[in-house]
Image: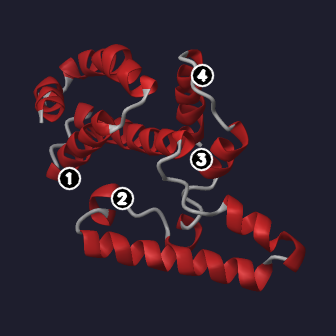
Amino acid sequence: MKVVQYAKTLADIEESNGVTVDWQKLYEITSSHDYGEIFIGDIKTPVKHYSLELRSMLQQVEEGMVAHFIDEHIPEEFKSIFRRQLREGKDESVEGQILEVADKMDQIYEAFSELQRGNTEKEFIVMYRNALIKIKQIKLHCVEYFLQHILPDLVSEGSRSPIDIAKITNEALAS
């Protein structure tokens, strides 16, 4: 649900900068982007992205289970709707890129929360850093807004952490 909320705000920023957003597509892809987790569970990002091979295998399993679910349990007249709504939404469209940013923001906040609590597990540092690097590469107005206005406030909140979140953030943004 957080990804949908982030995406709505990000899309509002895009629209305020003159970008046209297909709101129906955005809500469809954001509200169902983790649908496959119903079948395989929520595998934490550091595990899911441990290797490209593992990520690819998990994606194949998710897609196969969603397809099987649709084929076996959805009435024929609704199958095409479900296939459209449950497709992978991350693509080169504005909406797909917004989904990518919202999903990475969710990872940033999850990792940040762990780091702020003093959790020194390397996976959370890697997750935070990699999500920032990925977001920085996406050319959207909302990314600039996030990097200039939201992230600095977040990092200043992290100053109470035993882990130097500011250093990790600056290194990620410099790479």
Q: Is residue 97 left or right of residue 89?
A: left
Badge 4 amino acid? Glu
| Callout 2 crowding tier (Cα within 10 Å): few <14, some 14–19, many ≥20 | few
C-alpha distance separating marks 4 and 3? 17 Å
Assess whether mark 2 and mark 3 are in contact (beta carbons under 8 angstroms): no
| Disc 1 target residue | 123
Does label 2 or label 4 sit earlier along the sequence? Answer: 4
Q: Is residue 120 shown left or right of residue 38? A: left
> Dot 2 lies on which element?
loop
What residue sits right under mark 3 in the picture?
Answer: 30
Name the foreground residue: 26 vs 51.
26
> What is the C-alpha distance between the residues marked 3 and 2?
18 Å
Which numbered disc, 4 or 3, marks the residue that appears first in the sequence? 4
Residue ID at (54%, 74%): 63
- SS of the residue under disc 3: helix
Q: Residues within 10 Å of mark 3 (few under 14, many from 20)?
A: many
Which residue is labeled 4 in the image? 15
Q: In what quadrant of the picture does the C terminus appear? A: top left
C-beta proximity under 8 Å, tags 4 and 1: no
Mark positioned earlier in the residue sequence (1 or 3)? 3
Q: Are marks 1 and 2 in contact (CB under 8 Å)?
A: yes
Amino acid, disc 1:
Glu
Give the image's coloring scheme.
Answer: secondary structure
Quadrant that contains the N terminus: top right
Task: Say which of 33 and 159 sits in front.
Answer: 33
* Mark 4 to mark 1 CA distance (whole Å): 35 Å
What residue lies at 61% left-to-right and 51% top-to-bottom?
29
Could you classify mark 4 by the number of other residues whose Cα lies within 10 Å: few (under 14), some (14-19), or many (20 or more)? some
* Residue 113 higher or lower than 53, as above or below: above
Q: Are marks 4 and 3 in contact (CB under 8 Å)?
A: no
Within the image, what quadrant is residue 144 found in? top left
Question: Which numbered circle lies on residue 44?
Answer: 2
